[in-house]
Image (tube, rainbow, N blue to C red):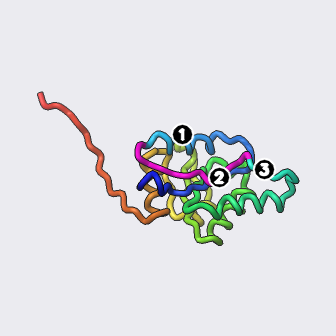
Amino acid sequence: MPEDNPIRIFVTHTFSDNSDYIRVFEYLESVSNFFYKNCSDPDQRPASGNKEALKEELRRQLTAAEIVLLPAGMYPEQRDWLMYQMVAAKANGIPLVALELFGGVGNVHADITARAVATVAWNEREIVDAVRQYARGEQTTRFETIEFELP
């Protein structure tokens, strides 16, 4: 994927600080030759702060994306807002990829798995491969290479 045509990614958020939201970008940044544009901006909280203004801003950010990433660990505390974003993604034909609970502790909620095209582990390679596959249809069949020396 060329640098002048980055994949547009929206990561679900609730206009507040969240460690999983930040962690997604730490993982994406650690991959070489992977270019993306972050369409999500939790700092763009509307001045009025009413529910409809928040929904409109989320819709505006989300519709600019090619793919939505949803860290499943955010769901228990922000169920309504994340459900809204999942429904908006589906309504706009944007694929949703869920990220398992960080650390692999617990199961991804059924509401998420029912709407996601894939659920991936917190692993740079799996996240980027899912983004490439579902955003652009790129097949990323890669193999692990293990180097060792014979005695």
Tag 1, which secondary structure? helix
Q: Which residue corresponds to mark 3?
A: 45
Label placed on residue 40: 2
Among the two numbered marks 3 and 1 on one chain, the one whose residue lies closer to the N terminus: 1
Callout 2: 10 Å neighbours few (<14), some, many (20+)? many
Please identify the quadrant where the C terminus is shown: top left
**Residue type, mark 2 in image:** Ser
How far apart in space, not on screen, are marks 1 and 2 (Cα)? 15 Å
Left or right of 47 on screen, residue 58: left
Secondary structure beneath label 3: loop
Q: Residues within 10 Å of mark 3 (few under 14, many from 20)?
A: some
Q: Counting residues from the N terminus, which is met first, the one under dot 1 or under dot 2?
A: 1
- The percent coordinates of residue 147 (x first, y second) are 23, 36
Q: Residue 81 location, x and y as percent?
A: 74, 57
User: In this rendering, which labeled residue sits more in front, label 1 or label 2?
Assistant: 2
Where residue 136 appears, as percent x and y from the top left, is 46, 64
Q: Quadrant of residue 2?
A: bottom left
Q: Quadrant of the N terminus?
A: bottom left
The amino acid type found where label 3 is placed reads Arg
**Which disc number belongs to residue 16?**
none
Residue closest to the eye, 65 or 102 = 65
Pick the front one: 59 or 1:
1
- Contact (Cβ within 8 Å) of mark 1 with mark 2: no
Q: In the visual, does 136 lie left or right of 108?
A: left
Instruction: Please identify the quarter of the rendering in which residue 145 is found.
Output: top left
